[in-house]
Image: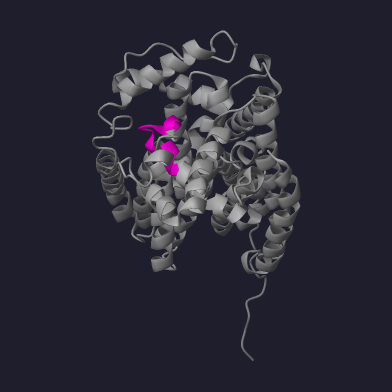
Amino acid sequence: MYYRDIFLVPLYLLIFYAIAFAVRPHYTNAYTKKYFIPALTVKFAGALALGLIYRFYYGGGDTFNYYNHASVMYEAFTNSFSAGLKLLFSHGEYDPETSAYAARLYWYKGAEAEFFLVKIASVASLFAFNTYAVMALMFAVFSFSGAWAMYMAFMHISPLLYKRLAYACLFIPSVFFWGSGLMKDTICIGALGWLFYAFYTGTIQKRHILRSVIIGFLAAYLVYSLKVYILLSFLPPALIWIFVENSNRIRNKTLRVLLRPLFLAFGAGAAYIGATNLTAGDSEYDVSKIGERTKITQEYLFRRTKEKGSAYNIGTFDGSMSSIVQVAPQAVAVSLFRPFLWEAKSPIMLLSALEASVFLYMTLTLFWRTGLVRSFKLIAATPILTFCFIFAIVLAVGVGTNSGNFGTLVRYKIPLMPFYMAALYIMTEKATSLRKNKTKPVVRRPKPIFAAHSA
């Protein structure tokens, strides 16, 4: 961070808040209006805090590596706009005009996802005068827009839960901290919010189809380019949601019961075909190789962080898909409910432990009050709950088996946290409503003593 950050940050904050106040009436109602500016504010705070912590606590890190490489591309743009454009749309091919700049982009040799983020950051740098803090604020604005889009979609589903859903979508500390700065996670959480909104609006509500397709395609492209495993986790429950939702609209109960397994089978099959084609040939995320890559990544990160006390072990697996299935329960538990409070070794890990404790308490309380069998029946009968829980569990298995340490896990799991917490709130409301209806006394109208006679 430099002196220009101190000068430009207040100026850009003024601009961003002015725009926010101007657009707020168009994207809020009487109930949600009060959350708009505070949600944007915590995103800004998270973006600036992340930069400060990486600078003064960690002494550097990914966010500044992204910035330094974006600065190289910014320099190319300022010296020769054509050279900057060539770098922006390059895929590693040699070009005499850009070779001097490309040689300085050493950190991302062969790392397509990281270099894609550098390209995004370099575009932001053109509007931020290559100022780190302002670029981070721009990333935060995009993340906020996706989070608010997610909130609006959930609000359509459960409008009475506007307070609780606001916390789930907008105010989870880990999400607005790790998902607001100059990082891949920021773009992914913002794009995921827009993807969920576009999917719900276009395929479930069947409104604004063209706009939803465009938004959904762009959001999916961003997630695919940066962290394709999030898209792989989103695709199966999303397609299942479509088929379940359509099966619920069949009025004939017998026909609905008969067709539901067929709808589920089609959804699962389409999700598998989509996932395998989406990653075919990818050295890191090809479905046929994902078990092997998971084993290598988990072992490397575990060895690297074991001495720091942040490593965890969910059991041994040989890299096959069957072994990943065996450790899946431990992976889900570690992603949703750990680190435990006594496992926290740093202030940042303590924050994650507190959130995990809240998740554990809410989950146990809900299933205890509702009953295990009744809870699963409720999830199966409510499409949004089916989607949220499958997405959270699939992603939890992925990040839980790949992370190997809590420091990495806290960043990898933030995409699932809003969906899991929103699902808990929606499920609690539905379970409470069912209990009230069950215990409510049936009031029978007394039969009239005298029959009515016409005059």
| In the image, residue 111 lies in the stretch drawn in magenta | yes
Residue placed most toward the observer, 297 or 288: 297
The vertical placement of 275 against 26, above or below, is above
Q: Which residues are magenta?
A: 106-116
Residue 407 image offset from top left, x and y in percent: 57, 23
| In the image, residue 267 lies in the stretch drawn in magenta | no
Residue 127 image offset from top left, x and y in percent: 58, 56
Q: Position of 41 compared to 195: left or right?
A: right
Q: Position of 233 compared to 415: left or right?
A: left
Q: How is the image coloured?
A: one colour
Residue 281 image offset from top left, x and y in percent: 24, 35
Q: Residue at x 63, y 19 (%)?
A: 340
Q: Position of 434 compared to 396: left or right?
A: right
Q: Residue at x 43, y 12 (%)?
A: 315
How many discs mark residues in the rendered view? Answer: 0
Q: Residue at x 51, y 31 (%)?
A: 412
Quarter-of-image position of residue 287: top left
Q: Residue at x 60, y 11 (%)?
A: 309
Residue placed most toward the observer, 312 or 108: 108
Residue 442 image offset from top left, x and y in percent: 63, 53
Q: Quadrant of the C terminus?
A: bottom right
Quarter-of-image position of residue 30: bottom right
Residue at the extreme bottom: 455
Q: Is residue 313 visible?
A: no
Q: Is residue 58 visible?
A: yes
The vertical placement of 420 against 333, above or below, is below
**What is the magenta segment's predominant secondary structure?**
helix
